Amino acid sequence: MKRQAQVARYIIADLFSSALAWTIFFSYRKLIIEPEKFGYNIPFEFDTKFYSGLLLIPIFWLGMYSLLGMYNNIYRRHRLKELGQVLLASITGVIILFFLVLLDDEIANYQYYYKSLVMLFSLHFILTFILRFSLTTQSVKRIHKRKLGFNTVIIGGNEEALNVYREMENMVPAPGFKFVGYVSVNGKDNLLEEELPWLGNFKGISEVVKGKAVEEVVIAIESSEHKNLRSIITELEGLNVKIKIIPDIYDILSGSVKMSSIFGAPLIQINTEIMPPWQFFLKRLIDFAGSLLAIIVLAPVYIILAILVKLSSPGAIIFKQERIGQHNSPFKIFKFRSMRSDAEKDGPQLSSSNDPRITKIGRFMRKTRLDELPQFFNVLRGEMSLVGPRPERQFYIDQIVEIAPHYRHLQKVKPGITSWGQVKYGYAENVDQMVQRLKYDVLYIENMSLAIDFKIMAYTIIIILKGSGK
């Protein structure tokens, strides 16, 4: 509840600053710009255009900030990050508003466009940054005074772990760790037992993270335990946690970590950034705009397919099924039903090329991928992306992980309507084929970029047009 209240404070501050910026800017245009254009003072009044802007423009800014992730991890915000994100959002948003709102203004010459653009940017950036800077500063001070903290688990329990724990606890200002316990590596490391509760072996770290709402994991193992490091990292893959390790492990993970000074703490943070933040922002923007456009343009196709599915066999038009998404979070995926409604009466079953459970219209939709069209709504809801690894059911994930533990790597990102694995391999008919398809999705994540996304979408469109999907 505290985090929701803090998010609400940021939203209220953003609404106020954007509304105030618009009010001052509107007054500036009426009192300065228009008299310069016409050569005499214009009667000043708040007209319909002002009130429309006062209603819609703050909503526009909230949408912009949401796409940039400025309401995520609200207590992890710091002042330098605030400056960068507000600056990026202000530049992008003001340019968009210029073309939507200001370009049709009647002006004496083009220099008035520059004046308006600079004034709107200055007002919005300064007002927004001041309020956000104030809120972020308050949070940082509360963290430094240990009034706020992030639930943290230490992996390891011997002397290294004990030293790290005591150093973090004695640090002033506080670095933000709120230790809830430790997990052992070899079953014998128990020096931390007097300081923190033992939470089990690292093999069960995923359950600990869920049960204790863990946000940070500090790996503090002895040199003799380095052989377990890869297994530990694999167990942490896909979990929404920050991973930090003590410096002497750096050489083992050379190239996959970055130095990070956490208020002076001697820790290294594993770099979990797959794409630069600006690309993630554009990816989400493309996801939202592309899905909304697809739903509007393909509305007649939705209606036709809905009728055909309804006529093909008894049952619901839309098939809903629980899948596992980013950070191991479950969600309901939407599809046009392509099988009989009792297709899984005997339990989970994958389909095959000549599966008798598939309806006639279902076979056509699968070849053309049209059964996936309702997933544009999943994308709008933020559960999926246009491009990303295909989400699976927990029933099959458990089997895949036994063969290929690195499957958890895929849960770092949102699942997608289409994927590299889907384009290259198509639908899997058994777990072995799922594992074979997995390599393509791992390759996608290791090479993730907007350029790759566009290529995958292009190949998907070709498959749809050819009807060559497997």
Image (cartoon, rainbow, N blue to C red):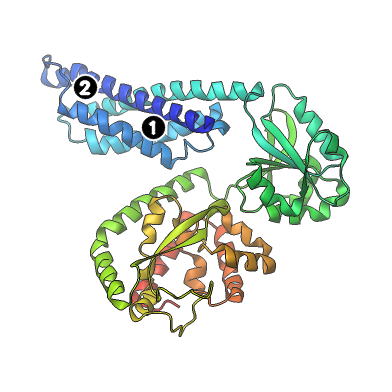
- Identity of the residue drawn at 45% across and 45% down: 281
- Identity of the residue drawn at 67% across and 66% down: 404
Q: Earlier in the sequence, mark 2 or mark 1?
A: 2
Residue 199 position, x and y percent, is 76, 45
Amino acid at the residue labelled 2: Arg
Residue 205 position, x and y percent, is 71, 50
Residue 279 position, x and y percent, is 47, 48
- Identity of the residue drawn at 40% across and 75% down: 339
Q: Nearer the viewer, residue 436 or 353?
A: 353
Secondary structure found at label 1: helix
Check whether the beta carbons of the residues at disc 2 and disc 1 lie within 8 A of each other: no
- Identity of the residue drawn at 17% across and 35% down: 104
Figure quadrant of residue 306: bottom left
Secondary structure found at label 2: helix
**Which mark is on residue 90?**
1
Q: Nearer the viewer, residue 255 or 375?
A: 375
Q: Nearer the viewer, residue 39 or 185?
A: 185
**Which mark is on residue 29?**
2
| Image quarter (top left, top right, bottom left or bottom right) of the C terminus | bottom left
Figure quadrant of residue 191: top right
Vertical position of residue 141 compared to residue 184: above or below: above
Q: Is residue 212 left or right of residue 458?
A: right
Q: Is residue 312 left or right of residue 418?
A: left
How many badges with numbers are in the image?
2
Vertical position of residue 245 compared to residue 419: above or below: above
Amino acid at the residue labelled 1: Ser
Q: Is residue 425 left or right of residue 112?
A: right
Vertical position of residue 3 compared to residue 415: above or below: above
Q: What separation in Å lies between label 2 and label 1 (alpha carbons)?
A: 19 Å
Residue 349 position, x and y percent, is 53, 75
Figure quadrant of residue 411: bottom right
